[in-house]
Amino acid sequence: MNTFYATAERAEPAAILRDLDAFRSFEKISELVNALPYIAAILNKERQIVYGNIALLEAMGYSDLESILGMRPGEFLKCIHSKENEGGCGTSESCRYCGAVNSILECMQKKEKITSECRITAISNEKEFSYDFSVTAAPFSFKDQDFVVLSLNDISDEKRRLALEHIFFHDIINTAGGLRGFLEFLQSSDDPEESKEFLQIASQLSNNLVDEIMAQIQILAAERGELKTNKKNISALGILLEVKNQMEHHLVAQKKNILIQNITPDQSFNSDPVLLKRVLVNMLKNALEASRENQEIKMGFETTPSHIIFHVHNQTFIPRNIQLQIFQRSFSTKDASRGLGTYSIKLLAEQYLSGKVEFNSEEVSGTVFKIELPL
């Protein structure tokens, strides 16, 4: 069985059942693991679950231990990467950057407790869910066999709070600071033309400020499943022009060129203009942040008989290790408190606009993000 990372081999079902019986006969172990408030599992050397606590079962709605025996952590949590390769959890290319797999492997190698963080995108009933866990893997010997005690503590709320704090204490304060600066210029300027220009920029900055706040409100509502859509007839060229006009006075757009290309002819389609604009703004903002001074960022669209495809292209290449993590919540190339940009693009586009998001990045041609929507 092939693998791109960790070993794919599994223990025989009979061996897993023997381990389960051994732990069940271990006095007080059930009381011990069930006293833990977070997910806890005992893994064999093949990284398979041979025992676990009630929190483990309740987390994903399983009724008994027998129903999850032999699963690996990603399979139990329904990670989207656990089915990418026939070897299962730990064997796909993306697993190289999984905090859970790496903690388990390092624990086995060093025979010591390892703690790290783990981002998992799971799928259930064709709907994606994002988790952030604090992962601890500790070695455990029992009846001359080596096991790993794995615990998963859900820190999603903490990561979301850190991201929102950064947005409010960094992005919004920066925008508010820029707005204050232009208002001060207005007070000191005696040139009517100059004052008019400053007033237009200040107006745009105030719009950006409100937009940053509304973006976070929408993401929180979307994650709770409370976001309502309001679909209308939209002009493709019109919404691209709105996005360009909104972003060209943003701080990240300074000394960079935003171009709208290949618009012949315009195309009307049915979607939610507010949410689609949010997706396109985030796509453009990410492209601007990745670009250097004087580089071009190109926006456009193309159509098929049944779909419209928007694209945003920049000249920067995304390294492969980042590509494999790009849509995970809390993942960011900036710092640990960021990471809602590409995640929100996928969340809004695929779960609320019936769309599909994808990207391609090449060293020569750069990076293009696409969103495909039904007409």
Image (tube, rainbow, N blue to C red):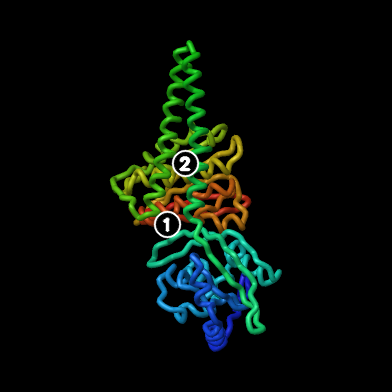
Residue farthest to the bottom, as pictured = 14
Q: Amino acid at mark 1?
A: Lys
Q: In this rendering, would 148 be left or right of 78?
A: right
Q: In this rendering, would 372 be left or right of 315?
A: left
Q: Residue at x 59, y 75 (%)?
A: 47
Q: In this rendering, would 314 be left or right of 224?
A: right
Q: Position of residue 289 (x, y in %)?
A: 56, 41
Q: Position of residue 230 (x, y in %)?
A: 29, 47
Q: Which residue is mark 1?
A: 356
Tell me which numbered mark, 1 or 2, is placed earlier along the sequence.
2
Separation of residues labelled 1 and 2 (CA atoms): 22 Å
Give whichever of 12, 319 is nearer the camera.
Answer: 12
Q: Residue at x 50, y 54 (%)?
A: 329
Q: Say above or below: 43 vs 235.
A: below
Residue farthest to the right, as pictured = 110
Q: Position of residue 196 (x, y in %)?
A: 43, 18
Give whichever of 109, 149 is nearer the camera.
Answer: 149
Q: Say above or below: 232 vs 179.
A: below
Secondary structure beneath dot 1 equals strand
Q: Position of residue 286 (x, y in %)?
A: 52, 44
- Between circles 1 and 2, the one closer to the viewer is 1
Secondary structure beneath dot 2 equals loop
**Quadrant housing the N terminus:** bottom right
- Mark 2 nearby-residue class (10 Å; few <14, some 14–19, many ≥20): few
For the question of whether residue 262 can be seen, the reply is no
For the question of whether residue 6 can be seen, the reply is yes
Count up the numbered dots.
Answer: 2
Q: Amino acid at mark 2?
A: Gln
- Mark 1 nearby-residue class (10 Å; few <14, some 14–19, many ≥20): some
Q: Which residue is mark 2?
A: 261
